[in-house]
Structures are given as C-alpha cells and as structure tokens.
Image: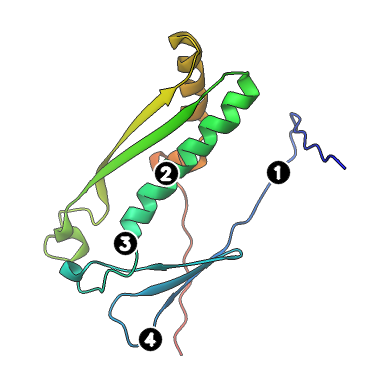
C-alpha cells in the first residue's frame, strides 16, 4: 500500500503544536533532561560553566536547530522546485558574550550577538537554480524565521 501526502494552497491555518518538556536532573548543577515528542536527550553545560558536559549546551542546541532546519528546508524545497541536490552541509557559529548571561554587565545581551551560517550545496544544477533554492529556504525556514523575526514568547510561572 502506498500513501501519498499532498499539500495545496489554502487560506485555512495548518497549525502544529510541538511540545518539549525540560526538567532539571536532581543532584546535578546544570544537567537537563529533555523530552521532545517520543525523543529524549540531555542538555548540560561544560565544566567551565559549572556543568558536567554530559550533552551539548542550550546555545549549541539552538545552532543545531537552525542548521538542521536549514538542511531539511533545503531538501523539502529542492523537491518542490524540482532541483537536484546531492548534499547539504551547514556549519554554524555564534558569538555570545557571557557577561550578559552571568549578569556581569547589564549593557550586554545574554543571547547571541551574531550567528554565521555557511551552507555548502553540491549537485548538478546551475548557480541560478541553486540561488532559486537558497531564496526559497531563506523565505521558508521556520527556525531562521523564528530567530530573525520577533516571536512572542508567553511565560507563566508557578511556585510550590
């Protein structure tokens, strides 16, 4: 049996609601257990920031989220545009001043001051076709849009 998924232009919202649970691992300084759907992983800080380095830290996960979303968006849009891509490699670096995170300077942002994304595409298409693909990815990558745009974040807090 073959299942085919099609998408059509619609004015109706096509909403998804990803949910992630992050919990401190009791007895550790910075280890976090994360559940994302059916998946589980550990986030931690390196020893230089008081952790035990049992997993990539949150800002590395943020870069990984952007890089992996770019790779997936390249694949999805290559298929939609009929563009052949043999490989997509995305290298990301970010600059973050720890004075903001540690509260050492209120003038310094705690988040990234910049993120550099370097994409290497390989395949048989012309530079013009790959530019068409790049433009589509820049326009449609959800994580890139979330980082570059202003996403409202609503927080609620409870104490026991």
Question: Which tag, 4 or 2, sits closer to the chain's start?
Answer: 4
Question: Which tag, 2 or 3, sits closer to the chain's start?
Answer: 3
Q: Which numbered tag is attached to residue 26?
A: 4
Q: Secondary structure at mark 2?
A: helix
Q: CA distance from mark 2 to mark 1?
A: 22 Å
The residue identified by callout 2 is 66
Question: Callout 4 environment at 10 Å: few (<14), some (14 to 19), or many (20+)?
Answer: few
Q: CA distance from mark 3 to mark 4?
A: 17 Å
The residue identified by callout 1 is 14
Q: CA distance from mark 1 to mark 4?
A: 38 Å
- Which numbered mark, 2 or 1, is in the foreground of this view? 2
Residue lying furthest left: 104
Decide if residue 100 is on the left or right side of residue 130. left
Question: Which tag, 1 or 4, sits closer to the chain's start?
Answer: 1
Q: Residue at x 75, y 33 (%)?
A: 7
In front: 1, or 63? 1
In the displayed structure, 109 sits above or below 115; it is below
- Which numbered mark, 1 or 3, is in the foreground of this view? 3
Please tell me in which quadrant of the rendered image residue 29 appears.
bottom left
Res 150 visible:
no
Question: Which tag, 1 or 3, sits closer to the chain's start?
Answer: 1
Question: Callout 2 environment at 10 Å: few (<14), some (14 to 19), or many (20+)?
Answer: many
Q: Residue at x 33, y 88 (%)?
A: 27
Q: CA distance from mark 4 to mark 2?
A: 29 Å
Decide if residue 125 is on the left or right side of residue 28. right
The residue identified by callout 3 is 57
């Amino acid at each position: 049996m073959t299942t085919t998924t099609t998408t059509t232009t619609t004015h109706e919202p096509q909403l998804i609601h990803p949910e992630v649970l992050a919990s401190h691992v009791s007895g550790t300084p910075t280890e976090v257990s994360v559940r994302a759907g059916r998946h589980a992983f550990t986030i931690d800080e390196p020893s230089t920031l008081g952790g035990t380095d049992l997993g990539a830290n949150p800002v590395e996960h943020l870069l990984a989220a952007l890089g992996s979303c770019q790779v997936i968006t390249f694949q999805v849009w290559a298929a939609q545009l009929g563009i052949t891509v043999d490989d997509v490699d995305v290298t990301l670096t970010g600059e973050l001043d720890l004075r903001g995170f540690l509260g050492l300077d209120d003038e310094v942002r705690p988040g990234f001051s910049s993120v550099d994304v370097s994409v290497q595409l390989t395949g048989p298409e012309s530079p013009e076709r790959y530019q068409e693909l790049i433009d589509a990815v820049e326009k449609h990558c959800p994580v890139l849009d979330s980082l570059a745009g202003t996403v409202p974040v609503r927080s609620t807090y409870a104490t026991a």
